């Protein structure tokens, strides 16, 4: 019993102590948890701060590397050239080209001789009170020798020659074109008297715009005008500009006092082509029996650059064939290549396609042969040329300086001949797409007849701008073009139907011989057997 009386209070006291201890533990745990939570939050803040400074350090380091790289790169000529940082430099040339090297442009040479005299002796003109010209504009299609003439002016006068292309003044940064103009003229003034040649001047002197989307769009042309106006009366600098798009030049550029002289350079005539052929053929070994004049009559429409290429292609072909001299056959080969495109060595390996091509090309040839105002048939082939499966080459009898209404109608008639022949042989549902370029040409000629040349009876002699024309006017023009094309189609159809036998013979001859020249075609269409067939 005593033992029991002592144990009960002890147990009770133990329970009480355990409860107090438990409460203390709970309090201690709570305080420890809160303390740990605060400590963890402070750690996160500290860690985030360290991460922030580490990120900023990396960014600054990368920026420093980029800055150092571009500071180094900006010193390179390539960088300066790309972004227009460096001064625009054009090295002056002392050219040896003279008027003796210019062939086929006698009228242009005569007009430029006075410019040469001015550069050689400017005092002769100023002593009489004459104002010396500041600029000369050379206008003509590509390849007629505008650059050669400019070089010849400098060579004849014996003065430095600066050349730059209009495209060189286009840059990605605004104002760089005007700065380049200043640099170019600044260098020229230090070498006066001299010649500045601006090729493709329509790129730099194009019509100024009033549009506000690009405030620097007109700076380059304005700077060009400013530089030319800034010439003193006896500076001795001539600016020669070359363009084949005179209509694109700003009127302020072409007015008197800037480009005072305008020289129009046309494609060479028969005499000019003969001179050019003689000049370039003298640079290669040729057969002594070569008739230059007959070759000149063949090359109607070719420019000086075309003739230079023609002679070079002939020399290459002669080399390939192992010949010691350039012969007429090589020049004929080169002419076909230049005018019709490179020929493939064989026909398409499909007889049906070749036969349809033969009828198509024969149709062109027959309409041309039996249409009085059409150009003469020079050559017909069913060997693929360029992107076409065949080709009919026509040449005028003499140089052309304009076209009559009947000549333009004849052009459209001949263009329609290919598709008409296919329709008569194969039916309307089986004509090929080979006439697409013919139709494109015919439509272009008919459109010009209606809208530009005043050859339409309903609309009369007027020029119609289709971009600004009213919807009603566009409908009228479309209907008149349709009338022209349908009429020419019927004329071509009538000719081929009345010469169906000749169509068959010519097509079969093309299948057999692949290519027929002018004499062979004439014999076939006159019912004769060509000597080359015997």
Image (tube, rainbow, N blue to C red):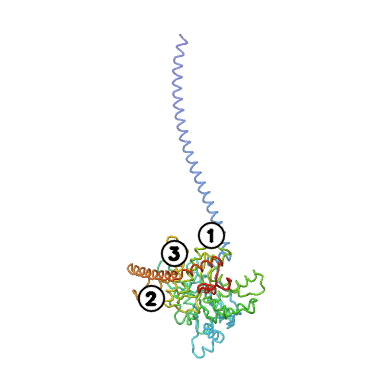
Looking at the image, which is closer to me, 444 or 336?
Answer: 336
Q: Residue 109, percent across and down?
A: 54, 83
Q: Badge 1: how crowded within 10 Å, few (<14), some, or many (20+)?
A: few
Gap in angstroms between the C-alphas marked 1 and 3: 20 Å
| Mark linked to residue 455 | 2
For label 2, the SS is: loop
Is the C-beta separation of discs 2 and 1 under 8 Å?
no
Looking at the image, which is closer to me, 329 or 465?
Answer: 329
Figure check: 122 above or below 480: below
Give the foreground label among 2 and 1: 1
Q: Residue 484, percent across and down?
A: 38, 71
In which quadrant of the rendered image does the N terminus lie? top left
Q: Badge 3: how crowded within 10 Å, few (<14), some, or many (20+)?
A: some
Q: Residue 434, percent across and down?
A: 48, 64
For label 3, the SS is: helix
First-in-chain label (1 vs 3) = 1
First-in-chain label (2 vs 3) = 3
Image-based side of 232 in relation to 449, left or right: right
């Amino acid at each position: 019993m005593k033992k029991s009386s002592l144990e009960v209070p002890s147990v009770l006291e133990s329970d009480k102590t355990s409860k107090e201890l438990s409460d203390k533990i709970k309090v201690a745990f709570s305080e420890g948890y809160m303390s740990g939570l605060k400590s963890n939050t402070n750690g996160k803040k500290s860690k985030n701060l360290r991460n922030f400074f580490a990120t900023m350090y990396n960014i600054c380091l990368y920026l420093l590397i980029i800055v150092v790289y571009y500071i180094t790169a900006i010193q390179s000529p390539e960088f300066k050239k790309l972004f227009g940082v460096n001064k625009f430099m054009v090295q002056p040339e002392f050219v040896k080209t003279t008027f003796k090297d210019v062939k086929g442009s006698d009228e242009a040479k005569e007009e430029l001789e006075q410019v040469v005299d001015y550069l050689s002796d400017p005092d002769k003109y100023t002593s009489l009170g004459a104002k010396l010209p500041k600029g000369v504009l050379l206008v003509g299609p590509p390849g007629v020798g505008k650059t050669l003439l400019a070089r010849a002016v400098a060579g004849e006068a014996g003065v430095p020659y600066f050349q730059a292309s209009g495209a060189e003044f286009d840059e990605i940064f605004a104002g760089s074109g005007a700065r380049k103009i200043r640099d170019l003229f600044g260098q020229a003034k230090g070498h006066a008297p001299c010649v500045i040649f601006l090729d493709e001047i329509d790129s730099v002197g194009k019509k100024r715009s009033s549009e506000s989307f690009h405030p620097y769009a007109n700076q380059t042309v304005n700077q060009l005008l400013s530089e030319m106006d800034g010439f003193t009366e006896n500076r001795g600098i001539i600016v020669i500009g070359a363009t084949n798009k005179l209509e694109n030049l700003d009127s302020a550029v072409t007015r008197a006092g800037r480009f005072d002289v305008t020289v129009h350079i046309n494609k060479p005539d028969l005499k000019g082509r003969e001179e050019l052929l003689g000049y370039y053929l003298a640079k290669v070994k040729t057969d002594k029996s070569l008739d230059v004049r007959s070759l000149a009559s063949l090359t109607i429409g070719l420019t000086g650059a075309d003739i230079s290429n023609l002679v070079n292609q002939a020399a290459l072909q002669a080399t390939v064939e192992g010949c010691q001299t350039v012969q007429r056959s090589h020049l004929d080969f080169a002419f076909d290549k230049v005018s019709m495109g490179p020929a493939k060595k064989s026909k398409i390996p499909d007889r049906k396609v070749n036969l349809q091509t033969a009828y198509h090309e024969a149709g062109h040839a027959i309409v041309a042969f039996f249409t009085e105002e059409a150009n003469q048939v020079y050559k017909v082939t069913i060997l693929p040329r360029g992107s076409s499966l065949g080709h009919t080459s026509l040449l005028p009898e003499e140089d052309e300086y304009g076209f009559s209404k009947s000549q333009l109608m004849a052009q459209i008639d001949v263009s329609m001949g290919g598709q008409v022949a296919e329709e008569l042989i194969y039916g309307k549902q089986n004509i090929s797409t080979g006439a697409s370029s013919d139709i494109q040409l015919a439509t272009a000629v008919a459109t010009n007849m209606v809208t530009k040349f005043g050859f339409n009876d309903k609309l009369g002699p007027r020029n119609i701008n289709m971009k600004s024309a009213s919807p009603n006017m566009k409908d009228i023009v479309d209907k008149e073009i349709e009338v022209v094309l349908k009429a020419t189609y019927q004329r071509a159809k009538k000719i081929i139907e009345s010469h169906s036998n000749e169509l068959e013979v010519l097509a079969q001859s093309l299948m057999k011989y692949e290519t027929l020249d002018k004499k062979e075609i004439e014999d076939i269409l006159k019912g004769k057997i060509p000597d080359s067939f015997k």
